[in-house]
Structure formats: structure tokens, C-alpha cells
Image (tube, rainbow, N blue to C red):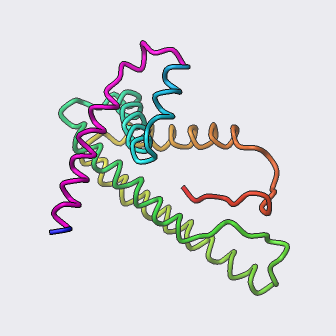
Amino acid sequence: MKKILFTLFIIYSFVLNAQRTDYDWKKMDPKQRKEVINNLSPEERKALLTKFRNNMVMENLNIDPSDKTEFTEIYNEYLDSQRQIKSQFNSNFDPEALSDEEAKAKLQQSFEVGQKLLDNRKKYAEKMQQVIPCQKVLKLFQSEGMMRDKMNERKPHGNDNNSRPKQTP
């Protein structure tokens, strides 16, 4: 019974979320947008960011409307899979504090996780090509790199691992 109630609660939350985030963002001034976003729960913010990201990708790649649903499923599955792989590597450590053996093990682990990320990317590139042309998959990965570079530009510079913990994406 508790599971059923919990499931209904989750569904109800998503319905409310869909209603609350259906704003005309283009007509809002930045202050209004910030206020609306600040009033959202973390789950609602995450859903909104996912929606914005997906819309931006669809628009950038000019995905055919008939393929949007299938592509969005594959794309979100890909991102979740990449996040899961990245979570296997804890990058919140001070390399200077590691012994030679610990550093070698950490380096090896980073190579293994990097290889898993690459293998996963190849796997999902093949899946995506079943829905969209190869050129668009290439454009997606290219834009992904540009977005990552932009995000890194906004992060504070320096390697101050002790002052703030690094969060995995």
C-alpha cells in the first residue's frame, strides 16, 4: 500500500511540475526567470534543466519532429550512462598526498574509466545513428565538447581540492 501511495505521489508531483514549469521564458525578464527558478525544488530545477538541454539539442541538431521522442530517450539514456560511469571515479583527492602505489592505482583507474566512457560513447553513437544521420551525431558530440569547455571557463581556476569538494556530474 505504501508503494502505491508513494508512486501516486511521485506521479502527482510530476504533473504539478509539468504545470509549474510551463512558463513563457522568452517573455520573462532575467529577474523574473531567476525568481521562478529559485522557487523550484531541486527536482523541479533538474527537470527544467533537462527540458532546456533537450530542447536546445533538438533545435541545434534540427531533429525531425517524428524522431524527437526516440532520440530524446536515447540521448537521456546516454547521458545517464555517462554519469554513472563518471561516478566510478572519485576525483576529489590530493595527488600530492598519495603514495606512489596509490597514485599508480588512481592513474590506472582514471584510464579504465576513460576507456569505459569512450566505449559507452561509441555504443550510443551507433544507437543514435539508427534515428539520426551520422553527421548529426558528430555535431552532437562536437557541441557537447564546446558546452563542456564553456562550463570549465566559468568554473573558478586553480587546483584547490581542500577548500571545496568536487562534485561528479
Name which residue lies at 56% across and 38% down. Answer: 147
Q: Among all residues in the image, which is located at the extreme right? A: 96
Give percent across and percent down for residue 32.
50, 20
Name which residue lies at 74% across and 57% down. Answer: 164
**The quadrant where residue 1 appears:** bottom left
**Which residue is more in the foreground, 1 or 88?**
1
Decide: is 162 above or below 75.
below
Magenta residues: mostly which secondary structure? Answer: helix
Name which residue lies at 82% across and 50% down. Answer: 158
Q: How many marks?
A: 0
Residue 45 shown left or right of residue 151 in the figure: left
Give percent across and percent down for residue 101.
76, 87
Q: Is residue 13 magenta?
A: yes
Decide: is 100 above or below 71.
below
Position of the C terminus by quadrant: bottom right
Give percent across and percent down for residue 44.
39, 42
Residue 75 shown left or right of residue 9 in the figure: right
Give percent across and percent down for residue 56.
41, 31
Which residues, given as a range, are shown in magenta?
3-30
**Which residue is more in the foreground, 58 or 52?**
52
Q: Is residue 20 magenta?
A: yes
**Which residue is more in the foreground, 95 or 67?**
95
Residue 11 shown left or right of residue 152 in the figure: left
